[in-house]
Amino acid sequence: MSNPEKLRLFSGTSNPELTQAICKHIDMPVGNIYVQRFSDGEVFLQYEETIRGLDIFLVQSTSAPANDNLMELLVAIDAAKRASAREICAVIPYFGYARQDRKSAGRTPISAKLVADLLQAAGVTRVLTMDLHATQIQGFFNIPVDNIFAGPLFAKDIQSKNNLDDIMVVSPDVGGVVRARALAKKLHADIAIVDKRRPAPNVAKVMNIIGDVENRHCILIDDMVDTAGTICNAAEALMEHGASKVSAYASHGVLSGPAAERLEASCLAELVVTDSIKQPDHILKTGKVRIQPIGNLMGEAIKCIYSARSISSLYE
């Protein structure tokens, strides 16, 4: 990188381990920032080093507690702007509120657009994120947004750990077909689709399997797993249709509510998620969740942005 002395990385409190992994890859220390919460929940922070005229990258996933982590990020951006940072890039590995990207019914918000407006009003000049739930969210911003993908990492992991002859990539719903097709192309594998209906939020009912999955190792691929209902129901349906084994890969392990209990009781061989979200002990203790590190990928993306190189080079 040219002029690395003008680059600084700072970590929010949502996932400091990921920031440390990014900094290790870039070979630079994590910047000094002081974060405090008052007894009523208000967040206060201060940069403990000068950032005047520097390009700074703030790493903060807006995962649970989503509102607290989002507000912390906004405060950090405002502080950086008032401290005369030259460029402020919000590195948001998991972009919360991305599921609310359109009006799903009358009198409902488009919360992803609201978050985009808040970030820009705070003073961010660029956003780096990974596997947005809806890629059109990039259009909610009037600043550059780089949306990188975990798919190539998943493809390498699958290739290194499985016999590809019996692999079938499966989309857990019709909306994820593009993602599943991209992974299947990398693996030179067939594709199947789980057709489901969702009668209520976080409630999924599997209706049909499109494709012959008999005696195949099915790899479910999704951008996120929240309560794990969709993934577990899909795995059960695939096994009922003759699949020999079902594994799942998801970029973001939200894994809230009954997710741990559902995973433990499921027929899934394993669920692989990235460390875009820090996983609590009760999730890791299920024995079904494996973490795919993304520190190197995010670090390379930051180097590309800082050096004005193409992000597409990450996948070549």
Image (cartoon, rainbow, N blue to C red):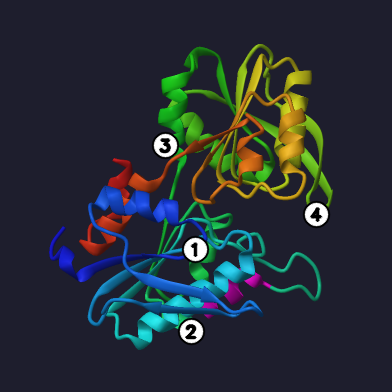
Q: Quick one: label 3 or label 4, which is nearer the N terminus?
A: 3
Q: Secondary structure at mark 2?
A: helix
* Residue beneath disc 4: 201
Q: Quadrant of the N terminus?
A: bottom left
Q: Secondary structure at mark 3?
A: helix
User: Does 228 sit left or right of 309 as displayed?
Assistant: right
Write down the residue under mark 3.
Answer: 153
- Pointers 2 and 1 in contact (CB under 8 A)? no
Residue 21 position in % (x across, y down) = 36, 49
* Quarter of the figure with residue 5: bottom left
Q: Nearer the viewer, residue 70 or 118?
A: 70
**Is disc 4 in contact with disc 1, using a CB cutoff of under 8 Å?**
no
Q: Which amino acid type is marked by label 1?
A: Thr
Element carrying mark 4: loop
> In the rendered structure, which amino acid carries the disc numbered 2?
Ala
Q: Residue furthest left?
A: 2
The residue that disc 1 covers is 13
Q: Which residue is mark 2?
A: 121
